[in-house]
Structure formats: C-alpha cells, structure tokens
Amino acid sequence: MVQDVRQIILTQEELQSAIECYRRITPNFLPQGQIVKCIPVDDTLHISVQTPAPNAPQQQDFVFRGQDAVKPLIRFCIENNIMLPMNGFKSLHSQEGVASLCIILTLNLDEQQETGAKKIPSFGPADILKFNRARA
C-alpha cells in the first residue's frame, strides 16, 4: 500500500485571497463587505466581514468547518495551477495560525497488480491524524 501525503501551506495573504476568490464564484458564501479577519484554528476557518450599514458598519463573524472550510483552498489551488489529486482526502489544518491544505491519497498497488483493475483509493480522517502525530 502506497500513501501520498501532500501539504500546501498558505500565507495569510494567500488565505485571504483564497476566501475572496471563492466568494466571487459562490455568491451566498459570505455577505458583501470587507474581510477584516481570516484565522484558521485547528480544522475550522474563522472569518470576520465588515458589512456596510446605513448608520455604522457592522462586523459579522462566520465559522466554517469540514469541506466548507476546504472548498476555498481547493479553488485557490485550481486558479493558481497547483495540481491536486481528484480522489485524495482533503482537509484544512492549521498550526500557529498558518493554514494548510492536507491531501492524503492511498493506493493499494498490490491489489491492482493482482486483478489488473483500478481500485478507488481508501483514505480517511484517521489517516490525517496518524500522519500529523508522526510528524510531531
């Protein structure tokens, strides 16, 4: 069994660009306004948007988890020609306020060679936890 693990690390500017980019193509993702904060915490994305209001601007806070937090990062990679495996398990990770897109692709080459058929890779959240613990 072969496991391909990739980690794409985004600077704070790249993360904010990813959010802006995703907001352009997904109208209901965030309300109109200026993004004032974009902070990754563990596997969540905390975003604050300052929305225009008649009397004074209001700040709204949003928290995205799971695939909702990953979609902007995937879109950023696509727009910047960063190759991503289609079948890989993708998740958001952060360490010390730095966001990264983690991709795990597991291939069972022995089984493919025996049968001559392609098998959909098996992967999951436990693989990412195991990988991160091994790196620590």
Image (cartoon, rainbow, N blue to C red):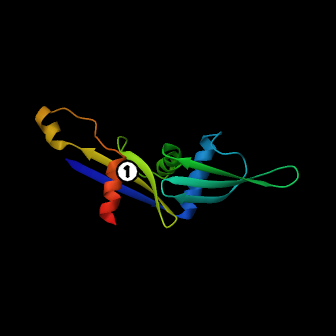
- Disc 1 designates what residue? 103
Q: How many marks?
A: 1
**Residue 72 drawn above or below residue 28:** below
Q: Residue furthest right?
A: 55
Q: Is residue 135 left or right of residue 20?
A: left
Looking at the rendered structure, the kind of residue marked 1 is Ile
Binning the other alpha carbons within 10 Å of mark 1 as few (below 14), some (14 to 19) or many (20 upward) gives: many
Q: Nearer the viewer, residue 80 or 25?
A: 25
Q: Nearer the viewer, residue 122 or 87?
A: 122
Q: Is residue 89 left or right of residue 39?
A: left
Image quadrant occupied by the C terminus = bottom left
x 58%, y 56%: residue: 17
Image position, residue 54 (x, y; %): 87, 49
**Residue 120 drawn above or below residue 5:** above
Q: Is residue 103 left or right of residue 43?
A: left
Q: Is residue 135 left or right of residue 57?
A: left
Q: Nearer the viewer, residue 125 or 114?
A: 125
x 22%, y 49%: residue: 2
- Dividing the picture into quadrants, the one containing residue 13 is bottom right
Image position, residue 120 (x, y; %): 28, 36
Image position, residue 37 (x, y; %): 64, 60
Secondary structure type for disc 1: strand
